[in-house]
Image: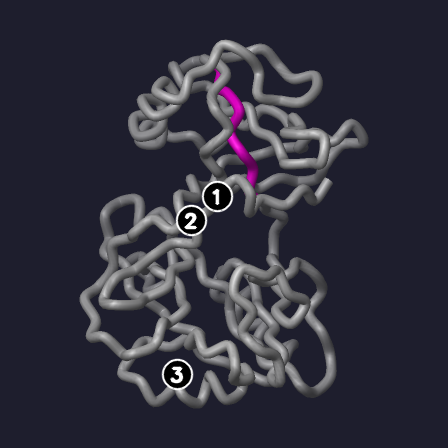
Amino acid sequence: MATPGELPRGPGWAFEVKWDGFRAIYTDERYYGRSGLQLSGPELPDFGVPIDGELVAFNAKGLPSFNAMQQGVKPVFVAFDVILPELTYARRRELLEELDLTISPRFTDREATTEAAKELGLEGVMAKRLDSFYRPGVRSPDWIKSKFFRTNDFIIGGWREGVRKLGALLVGSPTPQGLAYRGRVGGGITSATEAQLLPVLKELARPDSPFAGPAEKGNYVEPLLVVEVRYGDITPDKRLRFPVFLRMRPDKLPTECIDES
């Protein structure tokens, strides 16, 4: 897993674009998200080694779009690594490029990769150390991700009604003291999201707040679902400013969320 930060300069690094899809491991002719749940993807042969990549849907302009995936466009599996922990990234990429797969391109020019990704409206850029080893389940500084807009994953702890039945989500971040309330997210929730998510939230209902501290009143739920949110900033009292719902993250567990406040 990558560490958020500024892209490094100097030799010894490769750069890839950051794909807007679902991270997935392909093994035994099946796809699995980081949560361990099986995902749907294109049929591929068994390559004899687990492949790390992203399930990505493309819009009519040929650009990666999570909205296209939500609208039923079948995803493509874009591979960017093979899971062979004893080999360096450089050697793993050589092996990956021998396989009959759609492969995420890699570059050596930091600035050119960043400018091209911005021009295409992509999510960001990844930097990977050439001599680094694959470390499953570890958030490593050998992989650095730089996003062009501020986003993070948050845990749903409740919801409130508004103009629609699902007016806003109450979200939080994991801290040593428990689930800390980070605010209400109402923007970006479409009628399709409401139809898909509201029945699940009702199934997860609980009588008391899951937040370890002050939080808005609402319909509380078991803190099991992860959502990605775009926001402008975090206020001094650690609330999200101008938050917008981007998507659900069924490929992530609540324990994988990071408190960036």
Q: Is residue 47 on the magenta stretch?
A: no
Which amino acid type corresponds to the residue marked 3 in the rendered image? Leu
Q: Which residue is mark 1?
A: 253
**Residue 47 figure quarter:** bottom left
Prevailing SS of the magenta stretch: strand
Question: As displayed, is residue 226 above or below residue 171?
Answer: below
Question: As displayed, is residue 258 above or below residue 25?
Answer: above
Which amino acid type corresponds to the residue marked 2 in the rendered image? Ser
Q: Residue at x 41, y 69 (%)?
A: 52
Report the side of 148 relative to 225 (left or right): right
Report the side of 78 relative to 132 (left or right): left
Residue 77 pos. (x, y %): 31, 66
In the structure shown, which secondary structural element does the residue marked by tag 1 occupy?
loop
- The residue mark sitting in front, 2 or 3, is 2
1 or 3: tag closer to the N-terminus = 3
In the structure shown, which secondary structural element does the residue marked by tag 3 occupy?
helix
- For the image, the number of numbered tags is 3
* Marks 1,3: beta carbons within 8 A: no
Query: Label 3 neighbourhood size at 10 Å, few (<14), some (14-19), many (20+)?
Result: many
Question: What is the C-alpha distance between the residues marked 1 and 3?
Answer: 28 Å
Question: What is the C-alpha distance between the residues marked 2 and 3?
Answer: 24 Å
* Marks 2,1: beta carbons within 8 A: yes
Magenta residues span: 153-160
Q: Which residue is mark 2?
A: 35
Which amino acid type corresponds to the residue marked 1 in the rendered image? Leu
2 or 1: tag closer to the N-terminus = 2
2 or 3: tag closer to the N-terminus = 2
